[in-house]
Image (cartoon, rainbow, N blue to C red):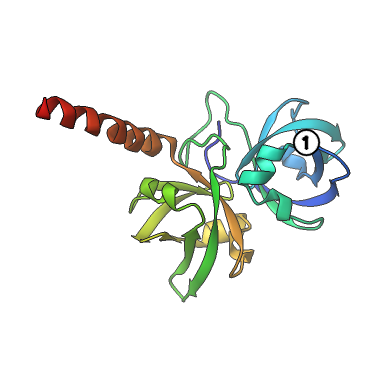
Amino acid sequence: MFTGIVEGIAEIVSIEKKHFPYNYTIRFPKELIANLNLGASVMIDGCCLTVNNINDCFVSFALIMETLKVSNLDNLCEGDMVNIERAIKINHEIGGHLMSGHVMTTAEIYEVIKSDCNYVLWFKMINLKNMKYIFNKGFIGIDGISLTVGDVFDRNFCVFIIPETLKRTTIGRKRLGYFANIEIDLHTQVIVDTVERLIPLYKNNINY
C-alpha cells in the first residue's frame, strides 16, 4: 500500500523491450535506496512494480502486458522522469489517501490553467465508465500523486495543484495531450459498485 505522497523523482536510464516482460531501470535518489530489497513493491508513476534487480542506485523492474495495457508506462522513454514512492510501513503517516498502485486507466490533459494563485489541470477520462467514481472533493491518484478532485463535468474533471506538489513531483512538467495514470479511490469504487448492485434487488423487493 501507498499514500500518494511522492517521495522523490527519478530518471529512467534504460528500457529493454526485446521480449516480455519489458525491463525498466531507474536511477533512484540515494535516500530511497536504503533497505530496499529484491521483491519489494515500489510505486512508479502510480503503478505498483516489483524490484527485480538492484545495482548501486540503479533499480530494475519487470513490466508485464497488463501493466503496459492499462497505464502509460509503455509510452515512456529513456531520460523521462517518474514519481517514486516506497511502500508504507506500519507506523507510516498517511498524508494523502491509501493507494494500491493498481492503475485502472489513463486520462488526457486537455487544458492547463496557470495564474499567480492557481495551477489547474483539466483531464478527459479515456474510459467513460470510470467517471461514475469521480466526485467533487473526492480522492484520485494521478501518476502516483494523491489529489483532490475539483470540478466534474461530463467525462472531464480537474484538480488544483499546490506549489509544493509542483516542486516535488513531475506533474508540473506535463503538457497538453499527456496521458496520466489514474487510480480510482478504492473506497469510492466499492460504495458505488455496491449501491449499483443492491438498488435493483431493492426495487424488485418493493415491486414483489
Decide which of 150, 156 is in the foreground and name it: 156
Quadrant holding the C terminus: top left
On screen, residue 159 above or below 22? below
Question: How many numbered marks, from 0 up?
Answer: 1
Residue shown at the point (49%, 52%) measured from the top left: 127
Q: Which residue is mark 1?
A: 62
On screen, residue 3 above or below 108? above
Quadrant holding the N terminus: top right
Does 96 sit left or right of 84 as displayed? left
Residue 62 in the image: state x and y as whole percent. 77, 36
Decide which of 69, 5 is in the foreground and name it: 69
Residue 70 in the image: state x and y as whole percent. 61, 45
Does 127 sit left or right of 17 as displayed? left
Tell me, yes or no, if residue 105 can be seen here: yes
On screen, residue 29 above or below 171? above
Asked which quadrant contains residue 22, the reply is top right
Residue shown at the point (73%, 40%) measured from the top left: 31
Does 132 sit left or right of 5 as displayed? left
Residue shown at the point (86%, 40%) measured from the top left: 19
Decide which of 124, 7 is in the foreground and name it: 124
Residue 120 in the image: state x and y as whole percent. 46, 67
- Label 1 residue SS: strand
Counting other residues with Cα less than 10 Å from the Cα at mark 1, is it few (<14), some (14-19), or many (20 or more)? some
Residue shown at the point (52%, 56%) measured from the top left: 126
Amino acid residing under circle 1: Ala
On screen, residue 133 above or below 75? above
Does 12 sit left or right of 173 as displayed? right
Tell me, yes or no, if residue 7 can be seen here: no
**Outermost residue toward the front in this view:** 208
